[in-house]
Amino acid sequence: MPNSMSQNEEQTERLLQSPYEVRDPRITLEGDMVLGPETRRMFDEAIGAMRYHKIIYSDWGLGAVDPTGRNMVLNFYGPPGTGKTLAAEALAGTLQCPFIHIGISEVESKFVGETAKNISVAFKSAAVAGALLFFDEADTLLGARLSSVTQGIDNEINAMRSTLLIELERFEGIVVFATNFANNYDNAFVSRIRYHITFELPDLDGRKRLWQRLMVPGIPLAEDRDALIERAAEASKGLSGRELRTVMRTALPRALVANPEQPQVTWSDFEGAIADVRNANRNVGKQAHLARSSDAEINSSIKLLGLSNATSNKQG
């Protein structure tokens, strides 16, 4: 008789066959993230719910009336550049578990029906690895299901979203969604998310803390470090953490270009870089609107499924 594989060996084999990378987190919430007070409060509550899950559901008996509460589904929402993606990795680091980061391109398929299957594989991979499962740009996945189904592509969109709902119901791990467009979520998904954690542009105190982290000790500053942090925090009002990082990335080379032999970073370097970021925000790219038309959402879903309009018309 052939030797049968042990359960652990079978899980390892399935994991090796998964197309999704299981990674160890490099950061933690407490050590590496600058979060606003409300965001921090919501994280503390969510982490507490996870850490005391056994007490609440087993010892106190909530599991008898809430059998689907075995998982934890969170949604990170807010403007671009406010740290949502980093926070998902940092949450995994705080919980000391691996994570799987999934972008839209990793689940979309040019083959009809394959996107739904890819979503199922993602959940299975996370279950085998004991990993936090993170979906970036989740508004495309969690958009409203279509009520007037007239084309084959409509069926595919609904099948994909139905699969996601089913997987969320039976998954027993941690799922995190992140979006810049939370208003596009279907209510069926909203009701299954336990914590909606808001990410906002940093206030003055948040900007000071971000600049404190960015101005690492090795940078040769021409002025007092604390004074520069104060000025930079005041001058960068309205910028996201990502944009502050861009300021730092462009300010430092200015000093080297000006004096390669003995560079010193001055306030004018930071001031010029902040002005450049603001100028780019005004003149480059197009600000997306939170509310999308139904046609725009359908086109987004068609792209997600890897199908062209011609294909969808053919299937109608």
Image (cartoon, grey):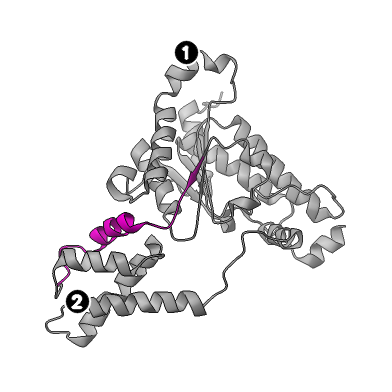
Amino acid type assigned to the residue bearing label 2 in the image: Val
The residue that appears at 58% across and 58% down in the rendered structure is: 105
Q: Is residue 83 visible?
A: yes
| Crowding at mark 2 (Cα within 10 Å: few <14, some 14-19, many 20+) | many
Camera-nearest residue between 314 and 178: 178
Q: Position of residue 34 (x, y in %)?
A: 33, 51
Kindly identify which residue carries mark 2. 265
Direction from residue 177 to residue 53 in the image, left or right: left
Residue 297, compared with residue 89, is above or below; it is below
Say if mark 2 contacts mark 1, CB within 8 Å: no
Amino acid type assigned to the residue bearing label 1 in the image: Trp
**Mark 2 or 1, nearer chain start:** 1
For the residues marked 2 and 1, what is the alpha-carbon distance in whole angstroms?
58 Å
Camera-nearest residue between 35 and 158: 35
The residue that appears at 19% across and 76% down in the rendered structure is: 265
Q: Is residue 105 magenta?
A: no
Q: Is residue 198 magenta?
A: yes
Quadrant for the N terminus, please.
top right
Direction from residue 193 to residue 229 in the image, left or right: left
Element assignment for label 1:
loop
The quadrant holding residue 192 is top right
Kindly identify which residue carries mark 1. 60
Magenta span of residues: 196-220
The quadrant holding residue 204 is bottom left
Q: Position of residue 236 (x, y in %)?
A: 35, 68
Element assignment for label 2:
loop
